[in-house]
């Protein structure tokens, strides 16, 4: 026991930091509260302290685990005469005691006090505190710190809409210097790697080897830091309380969890901040680049060493084997060429861990996503190889089937083209069609919006409910017919509105739900006009990110399908009429409402359609100049929620057509028909939907259009 105490005190002396480290999640929560209370000074102080505490905690974990690993290493085999269990677990207990004392001294409190929730950990991994910090610093007039905080957040979140705009504003501000844009969380190996690649591509091999060697050293160090952090508490994703594992099952499960985490560390260091995908073969690629660069500056010995190191990953790589033969010939056959010791250790340890993981997957169950391309095929058990091949084939077939379904979906009208499908738009159930309307048809519908003017459906070019920087006019399908009946607008234009919306419905139905009827839920001809004198410094959106049939909760990563959301809506569409304005494009995001996955730029005759649920959060960029007009469309599979205003509108149109069919209106009817494109969809008769009048659930739309407009128009 005395030797154990001495051991712990030795480790403590090597990893001591004075004072108590306040848990970072508490500081963060207080900082965010101060932020929303607009107490900028306190918010900035607490948020900075939370970042310092977070870094201190991770540093303490790395230092203590590294120190205790050295001091209580599992070396050699237990004595033949002694029980293996006592020999093994005495070392385990010593390691646990060492860690407890070391972390207690460094943190000033038990480690359990620093265990934050998954949501808080995720915020820090995504650098969310810097998002708050940049605003606080800006309000405090500390511009240089605001810029650095904004840049640090933006590097890891390059798709963040608001921050992108803020960064551009900072660049235009007087007093902001270029060196203010620095990443406060920059990883040394990525800076060195990109500099080394730049020198390499410019044939500056002497500088390239220096930076690539630096990158490789830093990357291996970062890998060790990441691996140390894997030795955390057991995280049971299933959380089954009915049946707790026994001693050895629990030990095995936790140990395999740690091994899988360690294996994934190579992906973490190989993923540049802000990127989703890791650089393939990050460690081997360093060695490949280095062997060539060393050969170009005449250092064949180091070139051979790098080639030998690379061959540890890919021992049958023919080009590298040829290089090795060449280096042997140049250096002399008697010259021993060996791989780097650090790379040998890296490969041997990784293979040992993979072997244990694959054994566990084969015999105990579970899955393993191997992060490396170089894993030897013979290491994978035969039964897992077959399953792996089956999974790959199944996934490939599902992808092909999905693509085939999208390609074969019949388009009922000639000349219409699919410009972007779901795959090209990085999502599901999204599509963009072009040439749905002709230029003349777009002009006729734009004429309808202007003619309606102040006699619209109550919008009357007032301020948008979503932004004070725009005005909008809106026209429902029934109001358009009533205006035509009163002589305020041309019947031909209102007929075209009916035809264009029905044509869109048939296209969307045939593409997404062939054989399953889609009914109109709501149709709205909407124009948004930028208030020219109020665009300076504008930071908001024309329409915030939302989903059409559920209440989006980005913090909880959920979308609640409950009132007041229009839960009966199944598909949405926008048929654009013009593009002579600035901004106003549609964009799709992840559930977080900030990560943009696709954008659609408006143009005459372009129809964008998508399912209305949580899989398609979307918003509209600010209209910064001009007037944007489109027909907003929503559809439902539920007949009881069919748009009742449309039934009335179709009755009015049929009545007008009947009157025009009389002898004295025959000439006018022929002129009406000839003025429209041959690709128009026929107008459905109101009698075909007369049953929908029995349902009253949607009648409030006619009585209270203003209550619906804030959620219905884009």
Image: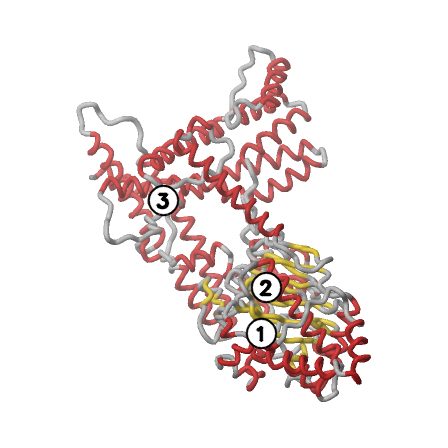
The residue beneath circle 3 is 231
Is the residue under label 1 in contact with that under label 3 (CB below 8 Å)?
no
Is the residue under label 1 in contact with that under label 2 (CB below 8 Å)?
no
Q: Check disc 2 and report its element: helix, strand or loop.
A: helix
Query: In this picture, is 182 found above or below 285?
Result: below
Query: In this picture, is 310 found above or below 277?
Result: above
Residue at image location 42% in from the left, 48% down from the top: 59
Residue 643, image x, y percentages: 56, 76
Residue at image location 36% in from the left, 44% down from the top: 231
**How many marks do you count on the picture?**
3
Question: Front-most of 381 and 320?
Answer: 381
Query: In this picture, is 307 found above or below 33?
Result: above
Question: Front-most of 369 and 350?
Answer: 369
Q: Give how far apart the Cα atoms at labels 2 and 1 are.
A: 62 Å
The residue beneath circle 2 is 146
Q: Give how far apart the Cα atoms at labels 2 and 3 are.
A: 35 Å
Mark nearer the N terminus (3 vs 1): 3
Residue 663, image x, y percentages: 78, 83
Residue 458, image x, y percentages: 64, 86
Q: Residues within 10 Å of mark 3 (few under 14, many from 20)?
A: some
Q: Say which mark, if any, is on residue 323.
A: none
Question: Front-most of 109 and 483?
Answer: 483
**Foreground disc of the pair 2, 3:** 3
Q: Residues within 10 Å of mark 2 (few under 14, many from 20)?
A: many
The residue beneath circle 1 is 688
Q: Is residue 151 visible?
A: no
Q: Check disc 1 and report its element: helix, strand or loop.
A: helix
Residue 166, image x, y percentages: 63, 65
Residue at image location 51% in from the left, 74% down from the top: 641
């Amino acid at each position: 026991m005395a030797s154990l105490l001495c051991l712990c005190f030795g480790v403590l002396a090597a990893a001591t930091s004075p004072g108590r480290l306040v848990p970072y999640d508490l500081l963060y929560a207080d900082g965010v509260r101060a932020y929303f209370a607009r107490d900028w000074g306190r918010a900035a102080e607490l948020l900075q302290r939370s970042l310092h505490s977070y870094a201190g905690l991770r540093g303490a974990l790395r230092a203590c685990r590294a120190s205790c690993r050295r001091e209580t290493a599992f070396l050699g085999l237990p004595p033949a005469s002694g029980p293996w269990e006592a020999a093994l677990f005495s070392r385990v207990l010593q390691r646990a005691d060492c860690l407890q004392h070391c972390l207690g001294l460094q943190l000033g409190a038990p480690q359990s006090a620093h265990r934050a929730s998954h949501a808080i950990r995720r915020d820090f991994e995504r650098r969310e505190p810097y998002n708050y910090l940049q605003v606080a610093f800006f309000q405090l007039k500390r511009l240089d710190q605001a810029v650095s905080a904004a840049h640090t957040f933006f590097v890891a979140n390059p798709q963040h809409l608001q921050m992108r705009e803020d960064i551009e504003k900072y660049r235009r501000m007087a007093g902001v210097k270029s060196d203010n844009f620095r990443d406060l969380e920059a990883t040394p190996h990525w800076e060195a790697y990109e500099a080394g690649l730049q020198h390499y591509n410019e044939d500056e091999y002497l500088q390239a080897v220096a930076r690539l060697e630096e990158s490789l050293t830093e990357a291996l160090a970062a890998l060790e830091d990441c691996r140390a952090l894997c030795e955390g508490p057991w995280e049971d994703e299933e959380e089954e309380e009915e049946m707790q594992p026994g001693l050895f099952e629990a030990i095995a499960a936790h140990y395999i969890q740690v091994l899988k985490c360690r294996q994934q560390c190579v992906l973490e260091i190989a993923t540049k901040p802000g990127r989703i995908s890791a650089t393939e073969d990050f460690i081997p690629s360093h060695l490949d680049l280095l062997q060539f660069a060393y050969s170009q500056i005449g250092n064949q010995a180091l070139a051979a060493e790098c080639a030998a190191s690379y061959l540890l990953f890919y021992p049958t790589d023919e080009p590298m084997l040829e290089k090795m033969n060449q280096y042997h010939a140049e250096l002399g056959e008697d010259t021993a060429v060996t791989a780097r010791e650090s790379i040998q250790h890296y490969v041997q340890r990784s293979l040992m861990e993979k072997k244990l993981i694959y054994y566990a997957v084969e015999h105990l169950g579970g899955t393993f996503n191997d992060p490396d391309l170089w894993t030897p095929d013979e290491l994978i058990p035969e039964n897992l190889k077959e399953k792996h091949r089956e999974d790959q084939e199944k996934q490939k077939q599902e992808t092909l089937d999905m693509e085939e379904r999208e390609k074969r979906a019949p388009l009922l009208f000639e000349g219409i083209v699919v410009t972007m499908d779901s795959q090209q738009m990085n999502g599901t159930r999204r599509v963009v069609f072009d040439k749905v309307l002709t230029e003349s048809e777009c002009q006729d519908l734009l004429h309808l919006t202007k003619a309606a003017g102040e006699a619209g459906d109550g919008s009357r070019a007032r301020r948008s409910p979503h932004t004070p920087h725009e005005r909008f006019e809106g026209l429902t399908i029934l109001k358009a017919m009533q205006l035509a009946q009163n002589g305020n607008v041309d019947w031909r234009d209102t007929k075209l509105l009916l035809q264009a919306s029905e044509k869109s419905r048939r296209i969307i139905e045939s593409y997404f739900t062939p054989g399953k009827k889609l009914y109109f839920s709501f149709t709205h001809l909407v124009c948004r006009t930028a208030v020219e004198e109020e665009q300076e410094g504008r930071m908001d959106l024309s329409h915030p990110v939302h989903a059409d049939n559920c209440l989006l909760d980005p913090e909880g990563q959920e979308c609640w399908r409950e009132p007041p959301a229009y839960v009966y809506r199944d598909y949405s569409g926008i048929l654009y009429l013009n593009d002579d304005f600035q901004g106003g494009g549609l964009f799709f995001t992840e559930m977080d409402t900030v990560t943009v996955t696709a954008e659609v730029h408006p143009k005459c005759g372009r129809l964008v359609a998508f399912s209305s649920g949580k899989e398609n959060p979307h918003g509209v960029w600010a209209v910064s100049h001009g007037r944007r007009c489109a027909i907003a469309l929503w559809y439902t599979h539920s007949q009881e929620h069919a748009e009742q205003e449309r039934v009335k509108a179709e009755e009015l149109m049929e009545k007008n057509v009947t009157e025009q069919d009389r002898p004295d209106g025959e000439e006018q009817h022929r002129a009406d028909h000839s003025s429209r494109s041959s690709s128009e969809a026929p107008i459905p008769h109101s009698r075909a939907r007369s049953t929908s009048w029995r349902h009253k659930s949607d009648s409030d739309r006619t009585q209270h259009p203003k209550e619906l407009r804030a959620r219905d128009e884009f």
